Amino acid sequence: VTVTGLARRPLGAAGETISAIGLGAMTLTQVAGATDADQRRRVVHTALEMGVTYFDTADVYGPAGGGDGVNELALMEALRAWSGSLDDVIVGTKGGHLRFPETDTWWVDGSPRHLRQACIASIRRLGLDPLPLYQHHRPDPQLPYEESIGALRDLYDEGMIRRVGISNANVEQIRSAHSILGPALVSVQNEFSPSVRSAAAGVAECEALGLTFMSWGPFGGMRQAKSLGEGGSAFAAVAQRHGATPHQIALAWQLHLSPVIVPIPGASRPESVRDSAAAAAIRLTDDDMAELDR
Ligand SMILES: NC(=O)c1ccc[n+]([C@@H]2O[C@H](COP(=O)([O-])OP(=O)(O)OC[C@H]3O[C@@H](n4cnc5c(N)ncnc54)[C@H](OP(=O)(O)O)[C@@H]3O)[C@@H](O)[C@H]2O)c1
């Protein structure tokens, strides 16, 4: 197995690191029947071969009609089928969302009771105790944020989770979570892509607090991802100069914007994973960055 020199970035402020580009596992099971177990293994094993060490899932990810751990189970099956060591791998899952199968609507429940139940269910499904990284999926507007984060603090103090992350959090919520969790909080996972650029304040806060900023949907989400380089986009122009793909430039652009950013692109094909992981080696110039930031 050839493990390339995929660059690494800090995970939180305690000296730990993860690969500069992770793998979002959601795409592996989002569309029913889109991948079979063999293809999922090839995607995940390609990521491992490329040096990816961070794998992102959630209890609710799965095909329309409800997730209920489908993605967590599929990811672990693929990881456990790897013949090499998984010592360096960090699986991050999330709790705090619910899905109603009848209508396939998503809802949030940030109550301490739900988060505890969800955490226990994820520990069982993943077979990882404590959970390496447990992320609060989305703030619950019905509850004070501190109540949900306090629940994660309890789970951490009881030894059920090793590291805590938050997701879809604004600057105020990032500060609040950091004040409650201290060094237990290592990451913030927010949307950030060429088409959704409102992440800057969150990234700056992560830099100030020593947190990793994981960007979800780095190509604009799975529905938009394929159109990234279309329509005379700057990403296509810069890609042509570097002999790269627009998707690689989108990832390289994020990595150049801040040392705390770790994009977690999703993929259902090994080719996508290979292409994305190689983006960590691209060096953009100031002119490239100015063109992409316009
Ligand atoms: N925290 C949250 O609320 C939240 C929300 C959404 C997503 N997420 C996380 O973020 C991850 C990524 O988001 P996402 O999957 O929605 O969107 P995305 O990463 O922007 O797009 C995924 C799509 O990009 C394509 N792709 C990947 N690498 C490529 C490459 N190098 N060249 C061309 N196409 C490429 C994939 O195609 P193929 O399928 O053909 O390989 C896939 O369909 C998810 O898996 C999940 O873990 C978190």
Image: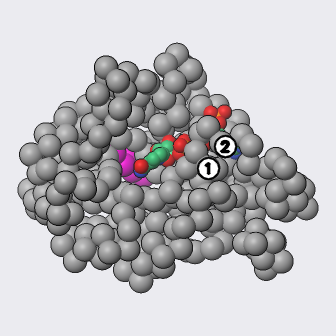
The range drawn in magenta is 87-93
Tell me which colouring the rendered structure shows: one colour
The reply to whether residue 218 is visible in this rendering is: yes
The reply to whether residue 52 is visible in this rendering is: no
- In depth, the one of 3 and 292 nearer the eye is 292
Residue 105 x/y as whole percent: 35, 32
Q: How many neighbours does mark 1 have within 10 angstroms: few (below 14), some (14-19), or many (20 or more)? A: some
Which of pointers 2 and 1 lies earlier in the amino acid sequence?
Answer: 1
Rendered view: 168 above or below 31: below
Instruction: Give left or right: position of 46 versus 115.
Output: right
Quadrant location of the N terminus? top right
Residue 47 x/y as whole percent: 57, 42
Disc 1 secondary structure class: loop
Quadrant location of the C terminus? bottom right
- Which kind of residue does numbered mark 1 sit on? Gly
- In depth, the one of 72 and 66 nearer the eye is 66
| Residue occupying image coordinates x 13% and y 61% | 147
Rendered view: 8 above or below 56: below
- In depth, the one of 178 and 128 nearer the eye is 178
Q: Is mark 1 within 8 Å of ligand 1?
A: yes
* Dot label at residue 289: none
* Dot label at residue 220: 1
Q: Is mark 2 within 8 Å of ligand 1?
A: yes
* Dot label at residue 225: 2
Q: How many neighbours does mark 2 have within 10 angstroms: few (below 14), some (14-19), or many (20 or more)? A: some
